[in-house]
Image (cartoon, helix red, strand yellow):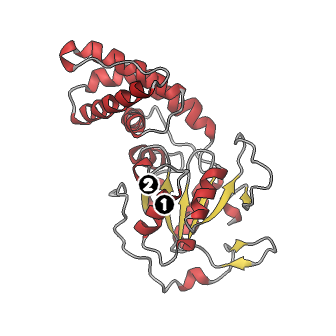
Amino acid sequence: MGLDWSTPSHGPIQQDRGAISAPVKAGLKDSNHNSEPLPRCILLDIEGTTTPITFVADVLFPYARDNVGKHLSATYDTEDTQEDIKLLRSQVEDDLAQGIDGAVSIPPNDAGKDAVIAALVANVEAMIRADRKITALKQLQGHIWRTGFQNNELKGEFYNDVPEALQSWHSLGIKIYIYSSGSRLAQRLIFGNTKSGDLRKYLSGFFDTNVGNKRETSSYIQISESLGVDNPSEILFLTDVVQEAVAAKAAGLKAMISVRPGNAPLPENHGFKTINSFLEI
């Protein structure tokens, strides 16, 4: 769908948004229940925000873990897998130098395919156990999940309010983007293969860790510059993680916390508005 660019192609967001400026059904409400102008862009986290944490922890991660060896063996000589191996080698070298637990040396290619794959599997399993948010792991996971979605072994799961909200925001002309630690490929797979059909038609672009860590303010500065808004406050970021909301707010974005079943408890006095459903926006 051409949605995997970090910098979307639509150019700067235009000012003449008559339908959006009207505070009708879907206005942002402040603490006094007054309506604010709708955002020009909405930036969404996935895990714990659009999608249950259990889907990621109990479905996606185990699928990648259980199929990593099979995937590497079946696709070893492909361009994608060789690029994945290159990234993993570089990451493991750094991990070994830093004494990261679970890192094991990957033998050179001339040691044989089986030896290389065995070492890769050991490293990937350790990375998954530690829930590491690193590009080398996320890219490989995305390629493994692609096979699962293509074979109908996986389907993206979303909270019931999400498809309706995406459709509503899209109809109002609001640009919707995803920002997740999962690769852009994985994001497209999750939104493109759901029980509600292909939800990518409502989305304008995807961002992953290539733009930066989700807890770093610089990441949100880059995103706001990519989206071409006149002011970062025209972007609303929805996440379940307070530290991410803090980083986004420091970059000038508006931020709200998504409270969903199974999410981690929030610290007291975090200072952000919370929502239990996208339909509250």
Q: Looking at the image, which is closer to me, 175 or 240?
A: 240
Q: Looking at the image, which is closer to me, 105 or 276?
A: 105
Spatial separation of the CA atoms under disc 2 and disc 1: 8 Å
Mark linked to residue 207: 2
Query: Residue at left 56%, top 36%?
Result: 56
Where does residue 254 sit, x and y in percent of width and height?
62, 67
Marks 2,1: beta carbons within 8 A: yes
N-terminal-most mark, 2 or 1: 1
Q: Amino acid at mark 2?
A: Phe
Q: Secondary structure at mark 2?
A: strand
Asked which quadrant contains residue 27, the reply is bottom right
Q: Which residue is mark 1?
A: 177
Question: In the picture, which quadrant includes the N terminus?
Answer: bottom left
Q: Is residue 244 left or right of residue 91?
A: right
Q: Looking at the image, which is closer to me, 2 or 129?
A: 129
Q: Looking at the image, which is closer to me, 138 or 61?
A: 138
Query: Residue at left 44%, top 50%?
Result: 208
Query: Residue at left 48%, top 35%?
Result: 154
